[in-house]
Image (cartoon, rainbow, N blue to C red):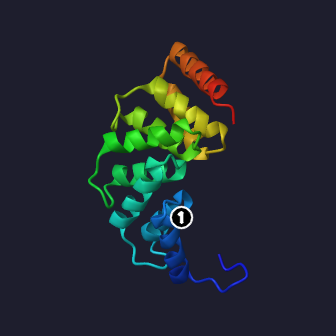
């Protein structure tokens, strides 16, 4: 970050790797980010996916979301929408807005999950409630394809999810 020292991504990767190899979840996430974006190391999606996987297995929601995104795009791992939805679902269940938005769009399109406009609306609505504009726009477009009963059901499911997962 360059706080108190000169910013040096290469040096930071060395220290993050030491912590990550000891199982430090946030260091594993950060190494995944460094490799995904090529900060201090050559960009390498395969290595990014490996570090994300280590953190994701331990429940780190951002790593789960990022790993799901890599599976969705086929970057560093084979493209696999089912695996993408699995990791997005784990992250979305922890309340991560980006994962909720992406999972909602997966339900909308039927990528990796059965197409389900009600579930799609629910996840998009939850992401929109956290300020994700793209999710709000997609949800608002989806409403035009839904019956009033389905919209009501999706809204009820979102409320119930929020009650079961107080922030």
Q: Where on the picture, by quarter, is residue 8?
A: bottom right
Rendered position, 156 above or below 85: above
Q: Quadrant of the N terminus?
A: bottom right
Which residue matches tag 1?
27
Look at the picture and state if 121 lies above or below 72: above
Q: Measured from the top left, where is residue 137 in percent x and y?
A: 57, 40
Q: Dot 1 surroundings within 10 Å: few (below 14), some, or many (20 or more)?
A: many
Q: Is residue 79 above or below residue 138?
A: below
Q: Dividing the picture into quarters, in which one does residue 76 lie?
A: bottom left
Q: Residue at x 50, y 78 (%)?
A: 14
In this view of the protein, which residue sits in the foreground, 140 or 16? 16
Q: Secondary structure at mark 1?
A: helix
- Find residue 34 and report its horizontal and vertical position in percent: 48, 70
- The picture places residue 4, in percent across and down from the top left corner, at 73, 82
x 42%, y 55%: residue: 54
Residue drawn at (38%, 55%) of the image: 70
Along the line of sight, the residue nearer the viewer: 141 or 99: 99
Q: 108 left or right of 92?
A: left
Decide if residue 101 is on the left or right side of residue 6.
left
Extreme residue toward the bottom, this view:
6
């Amino acid at each position: 970050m360059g706080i108190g020292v000169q910013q040096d991504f290469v040096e930071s990767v060395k220290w993050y790797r030491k912590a990550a190899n000891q199982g430090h979840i946030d260091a594993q996430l950060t190494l995944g980010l460094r490799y995904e974006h090529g900060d201090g190391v050559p960009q390498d999606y395969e290595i990014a996916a490996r570090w994300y996987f280590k953190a994701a297995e331990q429940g780190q929601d951002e790593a789960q979301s990022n790993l799901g995104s890599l599976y969705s795009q086929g970057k560093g791992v084979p493209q696999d929408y089912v695996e993408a939805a699995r990791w997005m679902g784990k992250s979305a269940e922890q309340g991560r807005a980006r994962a909720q938005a992406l999972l909602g769009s997966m339900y909308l399109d039927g990528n990796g999950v059965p197409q389900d406009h009600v579930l799609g609306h629910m996840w998009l609505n939850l992401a929109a409630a956290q300020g994700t504009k793209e999710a709000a726009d997609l949800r608002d477009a989806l409403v035009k394809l839904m019956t009033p009963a389905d919209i009501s059901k999706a809204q009820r499911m979102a409320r119930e999810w929020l009650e079961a997962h107080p922030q």
